[in-house]
Image (cartoon, rainbow, N blue to C red):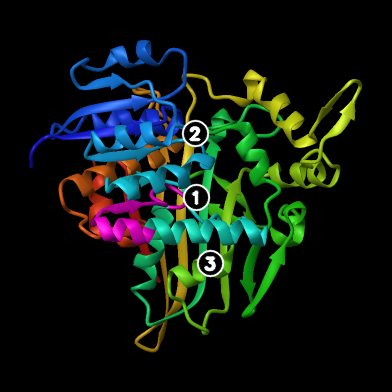
Amino acid sequence: MANKTVLLLGLGMQGTAALHDLVQYEDIDWIQVVDNRHDLKDFLTRYPADRVTALDLNLADTAAVERAMTAVDLIVEALPAPFAVPMGSAAASVGVPLVCSTCYVDPRESEPTRVRMLQEAANNIDHQARECGVAILTEFGMDPGIDLVLGARACNELDEVHEFRSYGAGIPDPRAASNPLRYKFSWSAMGVMQAYVRPASIITDGRLVQITGHDIFAPENLHELDLPELGTILECYPNGDAMRYAKQFGLNGKLHEMGRFTCRLPGHCAFWWIVARSGFLDDQPIRVGDSTVAPLQFTAAVLQAQNQFHYREDEQDIALVRVDVRGLKDGKKRRVVYQLLDRRDLATGLTAMQRTVGFMLSMGAHLILTGRLQRSGLLTALDVPYDAVVEGLARHGMRITRQVS
């Protein structure tokens, strides 16, 4: 193929990893990077000046954004979540493919009007992208992303799916879990705090169970996962909407159990169960002297400011994606487990969370640019061939394991 050009929106943790990988592709000729970080131009000097350049772009200026998009062959969007739908809409309207890790209709969103607006926006993006014949590839990161690819693969190996459990984790290597929480941030503290009070749902005994945001860490909602390869038991708490994922995988009424879970090192959930019930994760501002502050914002700021909750250069984090699917194959019971474990690359400094999200973004971009993914419209990781994902991850030493019993 002729050499291609890419517009990278966002150079945070995801974008940094995506850029690191994009420049490895010799058939990508030029990458423009947009970010408001003060050291952007200095940061980019580590790359060849004729291949990677900074672009000053006001993302609130729709006309300017669309002009920048039409000047390239593909957009990689690695911005904070509020930018996802506007950037997707702009790309679809000008007919340029885009890749992001965001879910346009967040399964954790519960406000009906907001859900309806997001769904309408997603439908419009899908319609415009199909008309232009381009792909808007979403949910193509670690979680969602790799979990969807592995889940679909496992479900396809069974005639009937009775139980489906999906696990995701971004945790310190046990040797790096050196603070009272046994946890360090591999993404924003505020993002973690907000995730700790989002409602979830699971299917148990064939019925849907709704769990409020302040109850996700309740003891009755937890279970343990024993992974010998980690040398520790993990605590698992519900995260996300089980019904949405059941629909994504096309699972029928024979489903008895369904859950999507996040994993942490032992003791973590008990602490946050107390914190949540004590009001430290509430988002309604309270007055403190002459100021007002939301408890959640305060809690995030306190943790974010402390070095003990951040990784040192010589410490590793672990990213885990695991799907455990059980049901029938040819009338016999079968269990299929797919799993990916990754650790920080100390040579590049990229964390496991950066690698599993950022490298997926760059992989998706390359699949589209090389014509290996030719579908159009609003797509997700479920539209990408399993073998292509396995091959792309293997480039970085990430191996997916499979167990059948």
Closer to the N terminus: mark 2 or mark 3?
3
Q: Which residue is mark 2?
A: 317
Closer to the N terminus: mark 1 or mark 2?
1
Callout 2: helix, strand or loop?
strand
CA neighbours of label 3 inside 10 A, class few (<14), some (14 to 19), many (20+): few
Q: Which residue is mark 1?
A: 228
Callout 1: helix, strand or loop?
loop
- Position of 7 with respect to 349 (left or right) is left
Give, as a three-letter code, the residue at label 2. Asp
Give, as a three-letter code, the residue at label 1. Pro
Give me the C-alpha separation between circle 1 and circle 3: 31 Å
Q: Which residue is mark 3?
A: 244
Query: Where's the N terminus, which quadrant?
Result: top left
Disc 1 and disc 2 in contact, CB within 8 angstroms: no
Based on the picture, tell me whether residue 127 belongs to the magenta stretch. Answer: yes
| Residue drawn at 41 percent across, 27 percent down | 11
> Which one is closest to the eye, mark 1 or mark 2?
2
Q: Position of residue 381 (x, y in %)?
A: 36, 56
* Location of residue 248 (image quadrant): bottom left
Q: Position of residue 352 (x, y in %)?
A: 43, 36
Q: Position of residue 347 (x, y in %)?
A: 34, 22
Q: Nearer the viewer, residue 241 or 146?
A: 241
Closer to the N terminus: mark 1 or mark 3?
1
Kindly tell me whether residue 331 is visible in this rendering: yes
| Residue drawn at 72 percent across, 53 percent down | 213
Kindly tell me whether residue 378 is visible in this rendering: no
Give me the C-alpha separation between circle 2 and circle 3: 29 Å
* Location of residue 128 (image quadrant): bottom left
Q: Which range of residues does the magenta coloring cover?
A: 126-144
